[in-house]
Image (spheres, rainbow, N blue to C red):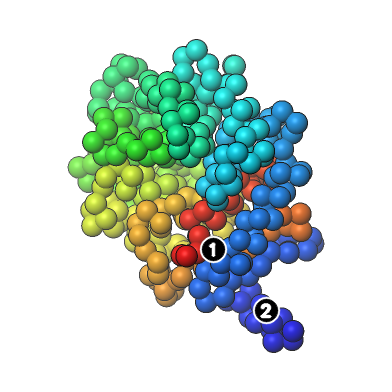
């Protein structure tokens, strides 16, 4: 017993948790040198049990007060970690989501200003449950809807406009990389690749969110920082959640860089492409599981999710950062296990972007964990 305690203490020093538990007991298991199946399964099972017993409302929803997107994200997370469609917790949330498909094909709450975001997340969830074609017609209508919302010729834009190809929340104020990333996630879950016109349009926008001067990025922000990282949007005058430099540059931050990297790969950009290589170089200098580099604790679990999805898409097991090689799957599993609450949930003490909602954050954690599955 004493040896086991010492071993766990040593691993926690090697793989420090991303956030503290605010005095609550951290009850998750910690992985060893490789991704250990029992550690993975224990962490996942405790999260599923939290959502089943404490997170889900009688109508099947999760945190309905925060919009349909939370329920869709949780459903996608549950299905991603192999909770079957027939399981009551999944069946109930899928039925709840189905009830929100609108006549225009979108899947969103009436009056929502986040219809693109909600529909993309719903597609990600429902496509995972469509093994027998049950939801094919529903998904086809939803695909038409999100493609219609994409900023392109339908909005009177030419390909020279910095907003061209992007996706926004659906309120039509401006597109951004986060929503464009979810658009590409949704299309990828439907089997769309770089040959799809909407995917290619999205790639134009994504490339313009990168701090890299090139023919792919003619925006005025491209060479002001030029570090290969990504920011929120070049549209409507440009914006970065990490702020601007004195010369008007839009600061890169890690969560958007992982989102941009993953989006390029989903759009068919080769791994040796200079855009991919520049993004990887930025991330090599900003590898962290303790914070979202450039944003601190803000959006930490969104960051874990985009990180895992991007590195999985990149196909690397050992990530070569400037501070050495990282077995990123093992480290990320240890981070999530050690920061899991006693009740099986996760929550970010920094509540920005709804990360104070344990349902949303636990959904992000499950999507992250789905990229950390041990090999059988």
Q: Nearer the viewer, residue 277 or 341?
A: 341
Instruction: Provide the secondary structure element on which disc 2 rests.
Output: helix
Instruction: Provide the secondary structure element on which disc 1 rests.
Output: helix
Q: In the image, what residue occupies the spot 73% across and 64% down?
A: 27
Give x and y (percent) for residue 16: 61, 70
Task: Name the residue carrying label 2.
Answer: 9
Which of the two discs, 1 and 2, labels the residue nearer the N terminus?
2
Q: In the image, what residue occupies the spot 76% across and 44% down?
A: 53
User: Do we see residue 271 in this rendering?
Assistant: yes
Task: Name the residue carrying label 1.
Answer: 332
Cα separation, mark 1 vs mark 2, equals 16 Å
Dividing the picture into quadrants, the one containing residue 136 is top left
Give x and y (percent) for residue 104: 46, 14
Q: How crowded is mark 1: few (under 14 residues within 10 Å), some or many (20 or more)?
A: many
Q: In this view, does 364 lie to the left or right of 345?
A: left
User: Do we see residue 16 in this rendering?
Assistant: no
Q: Height in image: 2 above or below 67?
A: below
Q: Height in image: 195 above or below 253?
A: above
Q: Which of 187 and 128 is in front in this view?
A: 128
Q: Nearer the viewer, residue 193 or 349?
A: 193
Dividing the picture into quadrants, the one containing residue 285 is bottom left
């Amino acid at each position: 017993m004493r040896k086991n305690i010492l071993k766990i203490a040593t691993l926690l020093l090697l793989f420090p948790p991303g956030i503290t538990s605010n005095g609550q007991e951290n009850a998750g298991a910690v992985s060893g040198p490789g991704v250990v199946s029992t550690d993975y399964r224990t962490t996942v099972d405790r999260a599923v049990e939290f959502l089943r017993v404490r997170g889900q409302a009688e109508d099947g929803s999760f945190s309905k007060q925060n919009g349909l997107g939370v329920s869709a994200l949780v459903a996608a997370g549950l299905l991603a970690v192999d909770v079957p469609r027939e399981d009551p917790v999944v069946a109930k949330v899928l039925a709840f989501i189905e009830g929100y498909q609108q006549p225009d094909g979108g899947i969103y709450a009436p009056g929502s200003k986040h219809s693109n975001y909600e529909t993309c997340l719903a597609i990600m969830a429902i496509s995972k449950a469509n093994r027998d074609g049950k939801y094919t017609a529903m998904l086809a209508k939803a695909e038409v809807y999100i493609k219609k919302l994409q900023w392109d010729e339908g909005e009177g834009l030419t390909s020279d406009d910095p907003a061209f190809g992007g996706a926004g929340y659906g309120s039509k104020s401006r597109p951004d990389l986060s929503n464009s990333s979810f658009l590409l996630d949704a299309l990828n879950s439907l089997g769309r690749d770089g040959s799809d016109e909407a995917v290619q349009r999205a790639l134009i926008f994504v490339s313009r969110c990168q701090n890299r001067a090139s023919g792919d990025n003619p925006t005025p922000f491209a060479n002001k920082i030029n570090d290969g990282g990504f920011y929120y949007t070049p549209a409507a005058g440009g914006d970065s959640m990490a702020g601007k430099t004195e010369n008007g540059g839009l600061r890169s931050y890690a969560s958007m860089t992982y989102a941009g990297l993953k989006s390029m790969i989903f759009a068919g950009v080769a791994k040796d492409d200079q855009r991919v290589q520049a993004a990887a170089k930025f991330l090599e200098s900003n590898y962290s599981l303790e914070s979202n580099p450039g944003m601190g604790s803000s959006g930490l679990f969104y960051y874990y999710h985009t990180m895992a999805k991007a590195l999985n898409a990149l196909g690397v097991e050992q990530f070569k950062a400037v501070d050495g090689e990282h077995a990123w799957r093992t480290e990320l599993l240890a981070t999530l296990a050690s920061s899991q609450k006693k009740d099986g949930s996760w929550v970010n003490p920094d509540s920005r972007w709804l990360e104070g909602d344990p349902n949303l954050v636990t959904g992000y954690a499950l999507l992250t964990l789905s990229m950390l599955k041990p090999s059988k």
